[in-house]
Image (cartoon, grey):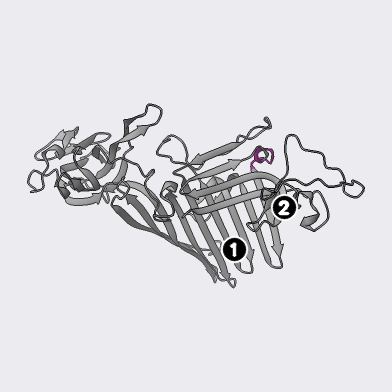
Amino acid sequence: MRAYCQAILCIALLLSGRPLAADLPDAEPSRHFLRRPPLSAYTNYGEDLYRPYRREIRLAPRYDFLGRFLAEGFLVYELDEQRPGGSRILKDRLYRSLNNLIVAHDSYGPWHWSLTVGDEVRTEFTPLTLRQAGFNGLRWDVVFPANKITLLTTRGFDSSLFPTLNSFSDPVAQGRGTLIDFLERTEENPVYNLAGHWQTRIGDVLRFGATLVNQHQANTARGSGGGFLSGGIPYPAMQPPAEITVRVRDDSPQSDEAGAIVYDIVLELVGEGPEGEATISSDPADDRFAPGLQAQVLGGRRGDGFREVRGDEAVEYLFVVPEDFAPRRARVRALVANDYRIETAQQHPFFDALRNQFTPRNTSFETRVRAPGEVRDFSNRRAVEFDHGFTTGQTIFGFDAEATFVGLKVRGEYQRNLLYRSFPVLRGQRDKQRAAAWYVHALKDVGRWE
């Protein structure tokens, strides 16, 4: 079963004042429609003016799914996705002629709406959710009595393949150019950014709003399965990691005092071994100990049963995954103290189509755990546990409010953050991390002090 999603924006240039679509030659069955052959017919230009053939830019008729004529115009922007299949964005050469910005507006009574498609559009919801000076994508704004609604969507690309590029900055160069300038990008693993904000007023006293912002990695090759907001791994044929590295750094490198302390780091893998389902550990004191998984410790200052790092120093624990073991979950257990920051990265085989072979690919380090505060006296020695995985999606949702009463203006906001991760194989263990943020701001005009 194929799930099909398509969003198209056309600029309709009507060439006739007649309201009936059947009067347009492009809507007649004798034209190229539903594979019908053209029919010879008498043509008179006494009433209908002669329409010469276009050479450079041609009008394209658009029909609904029942074959009824809708409009004719120039295709400017197209977003098309098929599952399984891929995601495709097309910005035609006319998109550049329109200065990379198209705005459609309509109203009915007290209702007003605007549809914006463009590059570098100023967009802001609330201080804790979304503030972007160069938003590229689609924006729909609706206003009706006492309410305002804004919906956003944009599509980037698989930033893991191009780590130096901004996955949500894909504009067309501005200025004059040739007529063949256009942008077309097809992705099997696109990154989507979806957002919505609703705001209402209750009298002249209270303003209330709600916001949802989501960013997730999609996998079009998997069909319609998987989490819509939580996302998935970059590509379904992703190989399990050959190496997993856990790095500990000083979370306050500018300080010259005692840095991060590491007593021990253990890695546990759950997956398929030579004898079936199994769990292996890098801890020699564990009955599930696998000698090949024991960590190689690199860097750090040696102490009495621990290693210390200060400033820009780092200590790395390198774990080599046994070749006969296929993991689907990796659990890290660390015994640390003081002002620590724990990061993880991995190396996995990646198929290079140009060379027709697998080549090793290293991922960048991602922060997983940080010490609360800046402790330097070993008083926060603790054991921390977390799952290693790729970030596949993130959702921020919450509300904001502003009230004015007797000269006192109070404004506040509360937001929840859900961060989704997955062990980087097709059926890897999923993990969700929760966090919250809020603020309250009060302002009172007390007049001039004498």
The segment highlighted magenta reads 95-100
Q: Is residue 388 magenta?
A: no
List x then y, in percent, for residue 249. 25, 39
The residue depicted at 19 percent of the width and 42 percent of the height is: 325
Q: Which mark is residue 8?
A: none
User: Which amino acid does the dot numbered 1 rest on?
Assistant: Lys
Residue found at the very far right of the displayed protein: 46
Residue annotated with mark 1: 148
User: Which amino acid does the dot numbered 2 rest on?
Assistant: Ala
- Near mark 1 (Cα within 10 A), the count class, few <14, some 14-19 or many ≥20, is some
Marks 1/2: CA distance? 30 Å
Q: Name above or below for residue 110 compared with residue 3.
A: below
* Residue 164 seen in render: yes
Q: Is residue 361 left or right of residue 60?
A: left
Regarding mark 1 in the picture, which secondary structure is present there? Answer: strand
Regarding mark 2 in the picture, which secondary structure is present there? Answer: strand
* Residue 380 seen in render: no
Q: Name above or below for residue 347 compared with residue 190.
A: above
Q: Are marks 1 and 2 in contact (CB under 8 Å)?
A: no
List x then y, in percent, for residue 410. 49, 65
- Near mark 2 (Cα within 10 A), the count class, few <14, some 14-19 or many ≥20, is many
Q: Is residue 287 left or right of residue 95?
A: left
Depth check: 155 or 51 in front?
Answer: 51
To which quarter of the image does residue 69 belong? bottom right
Depth check: 382 or 29 in front?
Answer: 29
Q: Is residue 96 magenta?
A: yes
Residue annotated with mark 2: 71
The residue depicted at 58 percent of the width and 51 percent of the height is: 7
